[in-house]
Image: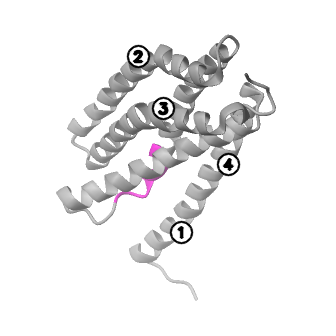
Amino acid sequence: MFIAGESAKNADLRDVNQRDTWLVMIAMSILITVMLGVQTKSIIAPIYMVGSILLSYAATLGLSIFLFKQFLGLEGISYRIPMYAFVFLVALGVDYSIMLIARIREEVKNLPFDEAVRRGLERTGGVISSAGLILSATFLVLTTMPIYELKLFGFIMALGILIDTFIVRPLVIPSILILLGKWSFWPIKTK
């Protein structure tokens, strides 16, 4: 039996979009993990790097939807926004992660591991923080647009970049590194 009309069309569109969104998210996560593995020459590092990025994305989306519901009375957002936000936030998170991890790995050559993490964080913190603030402000400009979907997307991106810049990079990643210690870059040996 075939059903026609706007409701049926929207239901089909929702189903296809959900499937495609999961497919894109899973494929991107796997491909980026593999690429990070090649770049870092490690099996462990890409797992916590991508894991922290996914955690950051989930926190951003959850907090944004909560704020939209509380302050704007929205019951939902466009089906496109989560995937667009995922693609942008993952790309930016990977960039910041690579910058931090590369610096820490340079410092590990000359310093004990805990000191190398601290020094790497000190040396990249200013660059990552200023880049995050500038990029967040750039996306926040979208909230001034007359298209409501762009307003929401701009807010989600600004919030996600701030979470990634000021929570994930300076707190979560270094904490994971300290907890894992010499296993952080396995199979590469560290001091």
Amino acid carrying label 1: it is: Asp
User: How far is mark 3 from mark 4, CA to CA?
Assistant: 23 Å
Q: Nearer the viewer, mark 1 or mark 4?
A: 4
Amino acid carrying label 4: it is: Ala
Q: Nearer the viewer, mark 4 or mark 2?
A: 2
Magenta stretch in the rendered image: 77-85
Q: Sort mark 4 into few (<14), some (14-19) or many (20+) by Cα contacts within 10 Å.
A: few
User: How far is mark 4 from mark 2, CA to CA?
Assistant: 32 Å
- Identify whether 182 is placed above or below 10: above
Disc number placed over residue 169 in the picture, else none: 3
Circles 1 and 3 in contact, beta carbons < 8 Å:
no
Amino acid carrying label 3: it is: Arg
Q: What residue is shown with label 4?
A: 27
Q: Earlier in the sequence, mark 1 or mark 3?
A: 1
User: How far is mark 1 from mark 4, CA to CA?
Assistant: 18 Å
SS at mark 4?
helix
